[in-house]
Image (cartoon, helix red, strand yellow):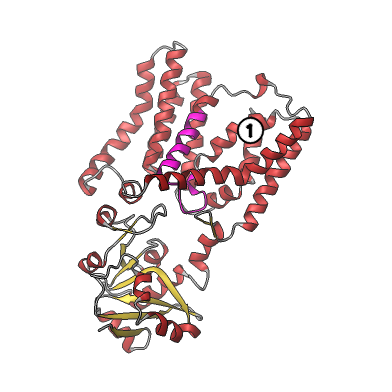
């Protein structure tokens, strides 16, 4: 229905979180596209049952699984819905159609799983061990996940819902045309959305602004659109106005770290803001050490390894099987549950521990050294998993100027000729500390 489609586009287009992520570089927008496409061709199957639609659903399902393995939840619900639809409506050729749907996945995914088991030693992604297979208070995880899901709907739909409830007390709220606006596919859609919302609660949500909501958000908007399209003109105007107002208000007010989430502006500032400048850190390290076999260790293992081109240990374990399985307890933030130990970093031959980048304004460097070097505060900020038993008697701090205003403070763990040379040329500064 074009009216439903139009309202779904309006709701999506004016959702700040959705618009931000679909113009970004993550796999999130691809998964949203694949989810929407799969549901579209599922609807085509329900409507006309042509074999080509079964094949397309199978191909898209395989791509969903490749893109993010947790997409299997979507695939499972769609396949189950197809099975139920055939049984309920007594359709013929059930086995042939289900095989046609499953065949692309079998052909594409089976070789991948064989290679994956041989190369990685596990069919589960490493992030499962880092994010889900954890020993942390499950009540805390579930409460964080519930808050993650609930806060999204409250922020974007709370005010429109309240306005509609007030409006409905005195006015006729809807002029609902069931023949025109009812979707026969709404139940499978609700199962997909409901399944993912429960999954997000189970894993504790996420730390990035509503990133996990993006793949299912088109389906949520499609599910809401029939009811919005069926509102009276006055109620429709109120709903639209309050929804746009909520999105604009949220976009302007949520700019930092709130509700356990890092906002889009904060995520952007990690890369470009002078006081964080992860891109600049990577480029500086590349300029200093690009011809060496230097090894670094970082927590945000994205921009810095990419721009530095240096061999990198992911201290949070998302890209490191050992840390994901055996890392030290760190925080209860999703994706940040575990941290590499000092002993492990030494075993891996790490030269520079960056951790979560510690940038200090150049005019405050002397004060920072006085307060944090001798007290070991700097060490524990760079490596929060550091235990008293692992704390060395002698350490070397490495200070790397990144831009005109800020210097990166790191832990110079293992000596390297390239670092020593850069220090001799006054490109970096090594500060040796004796704790005895």
Occupied quadrant, residue 56: top left
Question: Magenta stretch: residue 279 in it?
Answer: no
**Direction from residue 177 to residue 127 in the image, left or right:** left
The answer to whether residue 246 is visible is: yes
User: What x and y, as percent, mark residue 315?
Assistant: 32, 62
For image coordinates 44% across by 23% down, the residue present is 81
User: What x and y, as percent, mark residue 45?
Assistant: 49, 22
Where 184 sits versus 110, above or below?
Answer: above
For image coordinates 74% across by 25% down, the residue present is 175
Number of marks in picture: 1
State the predominant SS element of the stretch in magenta: helix
Q: Split into 4 quadrants, where in the image is the N terminus?
A: top right
Disc 1 crowd, CA 10 A, few/some/many (<14, 14-19, 20+): many
Occupied quadrant, residue 332: bottom left
For image coordinates 59% across by 33% down, the residue present is 222
**Direction from residue 140 to residue 20 in the image, left or right:** right
Range of magenta residues: 189-214
Q: Which of 387 and 252 is in front in this view?
A: 387
Tag 1 residue: 225
């Amino acid at each position: 229905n074009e009216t439903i489609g139009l309202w779904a586009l309006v709701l999506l287009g004016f959702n700040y979180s959705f618009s931000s992520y679909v113009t970004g570089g993550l796999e999130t927008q691809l998964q949203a596209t694949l989810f929407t496409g799969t549901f579209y061709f599922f609807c085509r199957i329900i409507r006309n049952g042509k074999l080509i639609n079964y094949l397309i659903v199978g191909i898209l399902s395989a791509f969903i699984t490749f893109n993010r393995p947790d997409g299997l939840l979507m695939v499972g619900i769609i396949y189950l819905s197809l099975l139920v639809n055939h049984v309920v409506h007594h359709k013929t050729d059930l086995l042939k159609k289900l095989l046609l749907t499953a065949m692309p996945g079998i052909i594409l995914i089976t070789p991948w799983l064989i290679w994956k088991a041989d190369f990685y030693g596990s069919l589960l992604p490493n992030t499962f061990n880092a994010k889900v297979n954890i020993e942390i208070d499950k009540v805390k995880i579930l409460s964080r996940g519930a808050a993650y899901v609930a806060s999204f709907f409250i922020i974007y739909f709370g005010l429109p819902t309240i306005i509609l409830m007030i409006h409905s007390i005195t006015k006729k709220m809807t002029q609902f045309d069931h023949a025109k606006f009812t979707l026969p596919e709404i139940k499978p859609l609700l199962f997909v959305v409901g399944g993912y919302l429960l999954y997000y609660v189970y894993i504790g949500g996420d730390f990035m602004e509503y990133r996990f909501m993006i793949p299912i958000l088109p389906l949520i908007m499609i599910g809401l659109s029939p009811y919005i399209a069926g509102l009276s003109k006055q109620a429709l105007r109120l709903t639209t106005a309050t929804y746009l107002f909520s999105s604009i208000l949220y976009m302007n007010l949520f700019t930092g770290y709130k509700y356990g989430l890092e906002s889009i502006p904060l995520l952007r500032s990690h890369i470009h803001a002078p006081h964080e400048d992860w891109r600049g850190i990577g480029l500086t390290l590349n300029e200093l050490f690009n011809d060496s076999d230097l090894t670094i260790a970082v927590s945000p293992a994205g921009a810095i390894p990419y721009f530095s081109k240096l061999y990198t240990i992911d201290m949070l374990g998302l890209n490191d099987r050992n840390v994901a399985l055996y890392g030290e307890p760190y925080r209860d933030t999703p994706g940040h549950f575990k941290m590499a130990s000092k002993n492990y970093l030494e075993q891996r031959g790490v030269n520079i521990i960056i951790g979560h980048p510690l940038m200090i304004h150049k005019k405050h460097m002397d004060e920072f050294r006085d307060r944090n070097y001798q007290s070991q505060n700097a060490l524990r900020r760079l490596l929060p998993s550091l235990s008293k038993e692992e704390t060395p008697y002698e350490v070397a701090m490495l200070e790397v100027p990144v831009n005109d205003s800020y210097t990166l403070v790191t832990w110079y763990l293992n000596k390297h000729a390239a670092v020593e040379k850069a220090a001799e040329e006054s490109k970096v500064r090594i500060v040796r500390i004796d704790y005895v």
